[in-house]
Image: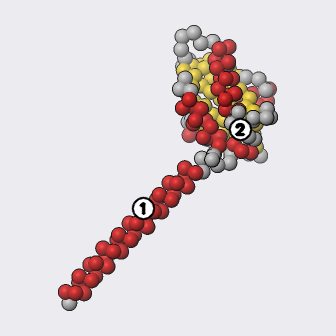
């Protein structure tokens, strides 16, 4: 009788351990899959933000069959939202849109791929600092956008998984 009790306990321990290993493996796989599904656009805004801490927020908007939507942003809550007027203006006009807010500048620019074809717009927000003007913030935003554009092969590539 004691052998059966011992055997039963060993089976339970082995079963719990096997379940734990399977569960941990499933969690690791799910986390890896989540990280691999980051789009090129999202990777681009995150990498650019890391290189330019003077920008408080960066976002990319594009127009598709669903209308004008934010496809990537350093503010994850903005992703999937409809474009605001200041975001979509550069897409319609091809010109920068600059808004001075109480806490800084919000600059939206047309965004192009590496070949120069329009793909959407990029919005870059800057915290207000002494000496800033609409003109120099627009130039700074153009420099940052230019760095981003060199990394965009096409509009379609923006929504594909980043490599």
| 40 versus 141 height, above or below | below
Q: Report which quarter residue 83 is drawn in.
A: top right
> Nearest the camera: 136 or 65?
136
Q: Earlier in the sequence, mark 1 or mark 2?
A: 1
What is the x, y in percent for residue 143?
Answer: 67, 23
Q: Please tell me whether mark 2 sits on a helix, a strand or a loop.
A: loop
> Nearest the camera: 67 or 161?
161
Q: Which image quadrant: the N terminus?
A: bottom left
Measure the alpha-carbon separation of dots 1 and 2. Answer: 37 Å
| 51 versus 39 height, above or below | above
Residue 69 visible somewhere in the drawing: yes
| 136 versus 124 height, above or below | above
Q: Residue at x 63, y 12 (%)?
A: 133
The answer to whether the residue labelled 1 contacts the one labelled 2, judged by CB atoms less than 8 Å apart, is no
Q: Report which quarter residue 81 is drawn in.
A: top right
Colour treatment of the image: secondary structure
Q: Residue at x 57, y 9 (%)?
A: 131
**Most distant residue in the left direction:** 2
In the image, taking residue 159 as reference, residue 129 lies left or right, namely left
Q: Please tell me whether mark 1 sits on a helix, a strand or a loop.
A: helix
What is the x, y in percent for residue 68?
Answer: 72, 38
Q: Residue at x 57, y 19 (%)?
A: 104
**Most distant residue in the bottom direction:** 1
| 26 versus 57 height, above or below | below
In the image, taking residue 136 as reference, residue 23 lies left or right, namely left
The residue carrying mark 1 is 24
The residue carrying mark 2 is 152
């Amino acid at each position: 009788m004691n052998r059966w009790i011992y055997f039963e306990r060993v089976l339970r321990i082995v079963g719990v351990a096997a379940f734990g290993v399977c569960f941990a493996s499933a969690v690791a796989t799910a986390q890896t899959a989540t990280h691999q599904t980051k789009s090129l656009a999202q990777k681009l805004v995150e990498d650019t933000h890391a290189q330019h801490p003077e920008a408080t927020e960066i976002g990319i908007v594009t127009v598709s069959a669903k209308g004008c939507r934010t496809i990537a942003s350093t503010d994850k809550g903005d992703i999937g939202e409809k474009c605001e007027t200041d975001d979509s203006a550069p897409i319609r006009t091809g010109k920068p849109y600059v808004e001075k807010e109480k806490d800084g500048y919000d600059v939206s620019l047309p965004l192009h791929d590496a070949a120069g074809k329009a793909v959407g717009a990029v919005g870059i927000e800057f915290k207000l600092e002494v000496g800033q003007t609409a003109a120099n913030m627009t130039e700074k935003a153009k420099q940052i956008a230019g760095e981003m554009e060199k990394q965009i092969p096409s509009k379609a590539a923006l929504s594909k998984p980043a490599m």
